[in-house]
Image (cartoon, helix red, strand yellow):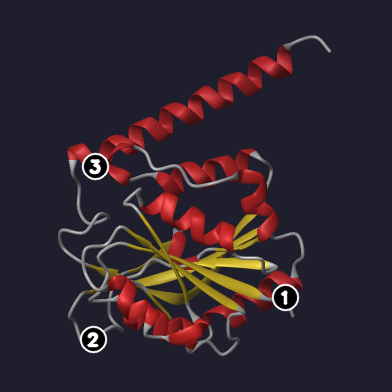
Amino acid sequence: MWSYGVAIPAFNAAETIGETLASVLAQSVPPAAIVVVDDGSTDETAQIAHGFGPAVEVIRQANSGPGAAASLAMASLRTDLIATVDADDLWLEDKMEKQIAAMQADRGIDALFCRQRQFRHGATDRTAGEERDGLNRSSMLIHRRVFETVGRLIDPPGNRGDMVDWLARAREAGFRLEMLPEVLVLRRIIPGSLSHGRDITKDRGYLLVARRAMERRKAMQKASEEPQ
């Protein structure tokens, strides 16, 4: 079976990172490596991660954004597969077992995602939330060659849209992205967090991501029309 490592970007996640790490360490197929990148937190995030002992490598950097933190964590892994999870989300215990089995059964899959169930921070019932496809870091499993080819996640203004941009670049590079039709991730909803709600300033990143994608498509079309 392929080995996998886990990349976790974290910023001021002291309230949640312990539970996230516990869900990773409880996987029925355990990870070969876990890397947490503390993105300039001002709380106890790094100390809590260190408390899990040698199973978790903790790297600290000045605050640079979730994409930069995720990229550093991913680049630090040397496993066949790279899984990512945000520091406030949770994995069901058979997530990695099922995703790895699906990728081994279909060797043409380059990146595999799964469905997720949302729950509100502090809620005791985590069984009745909205379910949706999880095209995000917390459900993503990729071959290491995909990250090496596509490159790092780029943080746009407002720090929203880094995964939208990265996934677009992965598709443009010809990689095959698939979705497991099963809930394997619990997505925590925290009011006031970076990804919660709509915010004009934070949402500027989505516009930049869309413009970059259009520019890349135009450049590719122009190159295909040029005489060989």
Tell me the distance, in whole angstroms, between the alpha carbons under discs 1 and 3: 38 Å
Sequence-earlier tag: 1 or 2 = 1
**Disc 2 marks which residue?**
125
Neighbours of disc 2 within 10 Å: few (<14), some (14-19), many (20+): few
Amino acid carrying label 1: it is: Trp
Residue sitting nearer the eye, 82 or 198: 82
Residue sitting at x 21%, y 59%: 193
Give the answer, above or below, for where 29 lies relative to 221.
below
Residue at coordinates 51% horizontally, 45% vertically from top-left? 166
| Label tally | 3
Whichever of callouts 3 and 2 sits on the residue coming sooner in the sequence is 2
Q: Secondary structure at mark 2?
A: loop
Residue 81: x and y, percent? 65, 67
The front one of 195 and 125 is: 195
Quarter of image, res 161 = top left
**Residue 130 at what x, y percent from top left?**
30, 70
User: Which quadrant: the N terminus?
Assistant: bottom right
Q: Is residue 24 visible?
A: yes
- Residue that numbered label 1 is attached to: 2
Question: In the rendered structure, are the residues bearing label 3 and label 2 in contact, judged by CB atoms less than 8 Å apart?
Answer: no
- Mark closer to the chain start, 1 or 3: 1
Identify the residue under disc 3: 202
30 sits to left or right of 43:
right
Relative to 24, is 177 above or below? above
